Amino acid sequence: MDFKRARATSKRIRQERTLLLVYAVAITVAFLISVYHNNNVSASVTDEEDTVVNAELEDIQEALVLQENLKSEQHMDLEDTASIEGEVQELSTADEMVSLSPKAISEDLIVVEKGDNFMGILTKLGVEYGEANTIYQAYKKVYDAKNIKIGQELLVSSASDPRYQDTVSITKIVTEPVSGTRYIIEKKSDGTYETRVEQDDLVSDVQTASGVIQGTLAGSMKNAGVPQNVVGHFINIFSFSVDFRRDIRAGDKFEVRYERKVSPTGNVIKNGDIVYAALTLGKKELALYRFKDKSGTVDYYDEKGLALKKTLDLKPLEYKNARISSKFGKRFHPILKQYRLHSGVDYAAPANTKVYASGDGVITSAKWVGGYGNYVTIRHNSEYSTGYGHLKSYAKGIRPGVRVSQGQVIAYVGSTGRSTGPHLHFEVMKNGQKVDPLKIKAATGENLSGEKLKAFQKMVAEIKADKTGKKQVAEAQQ
């Protein structure tokens, strides 16, 4: 029942009450006139007159009873009307409360599964496609949700209609694809979406790992707990100095110190740069330190501040002004008197000029080789080797199996074999094939000096002191 019906009932009751009152008043007046008339006539009356008076009295009593009954009914109807009006008012108030009360907020932790995508996840929650697209486009300001991956978590807060339990709108989404970095989109009071990125304050520390090589270097480092990306970086650092397939033997050692970024909860967020890397091959240690100067230049240097040479020295001679007397390619041989491939570059230089190792590596031969005369070969890594011919003699200690460093003296210029004068015949072999040395990228490392060298030496001293302290602690705990 509504307000209109209640008001009609109330009007009808008022009208009936009015009619009843008029009727009762009329009867009462008639009765009073009759009494007054009887008081002024003889008390002696006939039976017929008495009957008439009694009938009139009964009519008055019935009218009074009817009046009381109508009053009672009116009171009850008015109570019903008030009750009806109250019910209607309560329903109206309830509707207003439902429409004005806060929506029910719920949170769902959704784990992305195979076949899921961001838009699909939202529409499954009951969000209209247009609204889902609006959220996606706004989210792209900080995070492209199309990049969500299987296993990634999305914390979705949504507002629902409590009457129907339907999703009304998405109020907030949080995802953390990389530990420590959260991408957030949140609905504002005006209905638009704002986005932001929250980044945990990370702490930097340095982790040290070392071990004895059994099997492969990479496998041994992984067994020691070194992260995969650090293992790869370590191998790259030594890639132009070590042939990892031939130079590494069981019992050799490695040591690495690398930076880490750690969250307040202790989770490792990122493994950073290698600060110190060392390989002990047999009795020889190869150690490199990372150094960044004030200009921002970063490179790896040995303990003396000599730069790591990432490529070969293309003129490995003490006499740097040596001219090229013959280039790589087909030429008319001055002694054989025929056209032949000249497999290297000839540098004319005075006899006894020092010949250097073009790069770090291992001596694979040091012997007389036909027209090359005294000849030395060095294997630098699995890709490159170099050859040095027409040598007068070898430097002390140069023999197969010996490890040499870039710039180390290995021999002296001569004119042995088929030669018309003192010079160095220099060859480069790439994957076993002789190539033009002048087309191989030259070394670019720059040695440290002056203030840079002082800063570097201070850093090396700090690393050594830290290593010594940790070693002493470890020995004390054993």
Image (spheres, rainbow, N blue to C red):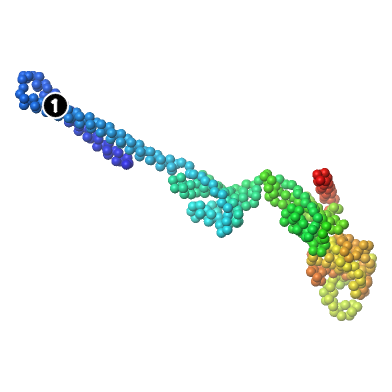
Question: Extreme front residue here?
Answer: 478
Q: Is residue 165 visible?
A: yes
Say if 446 sits above or below 339 in the image. Answer: above
**Secondary structure under the numbered disc 1 in the rendered image:** helix
Residue at image point 75% right, 55% down: 223
Residue 206 location, x and y as percent? 76, 48
Residue 344, placed above or below residue 108: below
Residue 53 coordinates in the image, percent (x, y): 10, 26
The residue nearer to you, when weighing 48 against 419, is 48
Residue 192 appears in the rendering = no
Residue type at mark 1 is Leu
Q: Which residue is mark 1?
A: 57
Question: Residue 111 at x, y = what percent?
Answer: 58, 53
Within the image, what quadrant is residue 312 found in? Answer: bottom right
Residue at 48 percent of width and 47 percent of height: 160
Residue 357 sits above or below residue 448 on the image: below
- Along the line of sight, which residue is nearer the eye, 380 or 266? 266
